[in-house]
Image (cartoon, rainbow, N blue to C red):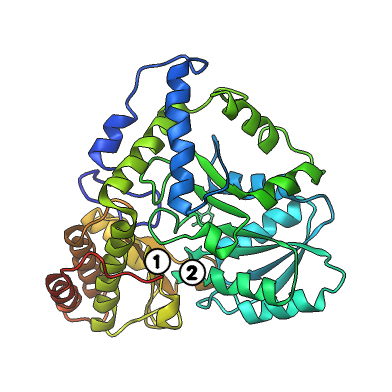
């Protein structure tokens, strides 16, 4: 695959040249004050991005999966019950990880294409009079289906049930691209990685913790070593790491946050909304539908597009890669073969998105889908041309 074309996968995302240069560093002594001067702005920046005032941010050398594991093993004890909805491959994988770690997961099976069902979660919490459920897991942006969940409504359900469970949220494909309000939504642990909204290579697990989560950490008895929050917080306080840190990526994270804040976080979210809306209009012009069942569920970082029943969506992705050297994403799990995904997060502009829309269109026409060449591009062009405000956004 040529490196000349942008990728349209929902992470890893395109790395801006400026950021690529920022991570091209000579070796440094990670026990020096120069490292602390990189680490502390990165940690403080994470808190601003997730809108957490009072709490801690933590970075591990791993990926989003490592952040899932770190959160549950630091905050829960073996045999604890957690509550989660399964509505896509990533909510499924977090459930699987919890089971393999020895937690008891109460699963609410939910149609793929819907978000975390606040009402059903609330009913399960209300029924749990003994407060056996220690944590509720929510996947803010289900990357497999292009569905955004309403975290605030899950917080409301917890409060309405008067339930003390922790609220742990996977923001791997939303944080730094879509608005995330940790304090306002009462999120106890927010989880992400470096390779999506932060536009870096994979390699960092990022976790932000509320004070309530930090208190839970003190009583959790799950075995952990590499991912121990306590060791990490102690070392970070004196400017270091409990082991060798991924210095370049941490420097890159601090730089990425400077870039995001230079644009303005609200402008970053508005840009993602606008780009996504162009992709959605193109999808409609093609006569196709999104996997997300209704507009309030639409993700601004990835669109999962349902193809006609007689088409294998994987062929569209393979064909675009082979003929046009452009990467889209296949459907996963229950929607494998049924959807293909256009990732539109991170370093992305209207003009880049138009090239992705045009390529998807060519690939589908090549494969005989009844789509008029130019129809999706024109719909997106019209939207991008007339939507001049960068401020249009959704809460
Ligand atoms: N959660 C979500 C929503 C994701 O999209 C992903 C990866 O795409 C993960 C978790 C797992 O992250 P990683 O692949 O960085 O381990």
Residue beneath the point at 72% across and 44% down:
74
In the picture provided, is 313 more to the left or to the right than 98? Answer: left
Residue beneath the point at 81% across and 78% down:
127
Mark number displayed over residue 314: 1
The spot of residue 97 in percent (x, y) is 68, 53
Residue extending furthest toward the right: 130
Q: Can residue 60 be seen in this view?
A: yes
- Picture quadrant of residue 38: top left
Counting other residues with Cα less than 10 Å from the Cα at mark 2, is it few (<14), some (14-19), or many (20 or more)? some
Counting other residues with Cα less than 10 Å from the Cα at mark 1, is it few (<14), some (14-19), or many (20 or more)? some
- Picture quadrant of residue 301: bottom left
> Helix or strand or loop: what does disc 1 sit on?
helix
Mark number displayed over residue 336: 2
Which residue is at the front of the view, 123 or 161? 161
Vertical relation: 29 (above or below) 327: above
State the count of labels: 2
């Amino acid at each position: 695959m040529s490196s000349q074309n942008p990728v349209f996968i929902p992470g890893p995302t395109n790395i801006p040249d400026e950021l690529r240069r920022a991570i091209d560093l000579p070796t440094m002594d990670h026990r020096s004050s120069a490292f602390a001067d990189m680490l502390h702005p990165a940690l403080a920046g994470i808190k601003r991005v997730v809108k957490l005032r009072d709490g801690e941010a933590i970075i591990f050398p791993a990926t989003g999966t490592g952040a899932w594991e770190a959160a549950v093993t630091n905050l829960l004890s073996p045999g604890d019950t957690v509550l989660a909805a399964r509505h896509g491959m990533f909510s499924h994988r977090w459930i699987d990880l919890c089971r393999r770690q020895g937690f008891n997961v109460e699963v609410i099976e939910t149609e793929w294409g819907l978000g975390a069902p606040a009402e059903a979660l609330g009913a399960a919490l209300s029924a749990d009079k003994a407060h056996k459920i220690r944590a509720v897991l929510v996947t803010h942006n289900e990357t497999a289906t292009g569905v955004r969940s309403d975290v605030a409504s899950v917080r409301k359900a917890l409060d309405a049930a008067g339930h003390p469970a922790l609220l742990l949220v996977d923001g791997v494909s939303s944080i730094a691209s879509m608005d995330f309000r940790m304090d306002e939504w009462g999120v106890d642990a927010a989880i992400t990685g470096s390779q999506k909204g932060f536009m870096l290579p994979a390699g960092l697990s990022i976790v932000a913790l509320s004070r309530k989560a930090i208190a839970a950490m003190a009583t959790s008895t799950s075995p952990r070593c590499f991912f121990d929050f306590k060791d990490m917080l102690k070392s970070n306080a004196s400017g270091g790491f409990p082991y060798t840190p991924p210095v370049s990526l941490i420097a890159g994270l601090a730089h990425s946050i400077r870039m995001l804040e230079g644009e303005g976080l609200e402008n970053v979210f508005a840009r993602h909304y606008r780009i996504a809306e162009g992709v959605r209009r193109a999808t409609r012009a093609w006569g196709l539908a999104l996997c997300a069942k209704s507009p309030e569920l639409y993700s601004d970082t990835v669109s999962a597009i349902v193809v006609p029943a007689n088409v294998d969506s994987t062929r569209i992705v393979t064909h675009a890669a082979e003929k046009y050297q452009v990467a889209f994403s296949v459907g996963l799990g229950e929607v494998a073969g049924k959807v293909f995904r256009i990732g539109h997060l991170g370093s992305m502009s209207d003009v880049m998105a138009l090239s992705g829309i045009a390529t998807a269109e060519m690939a589908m026409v090549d494969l005989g889908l009844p789509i008029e060449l130019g129809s999706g591009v024109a719909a997106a062009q019209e939207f991008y041309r007339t939507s001049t405000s960068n401020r249009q956004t959704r809460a």
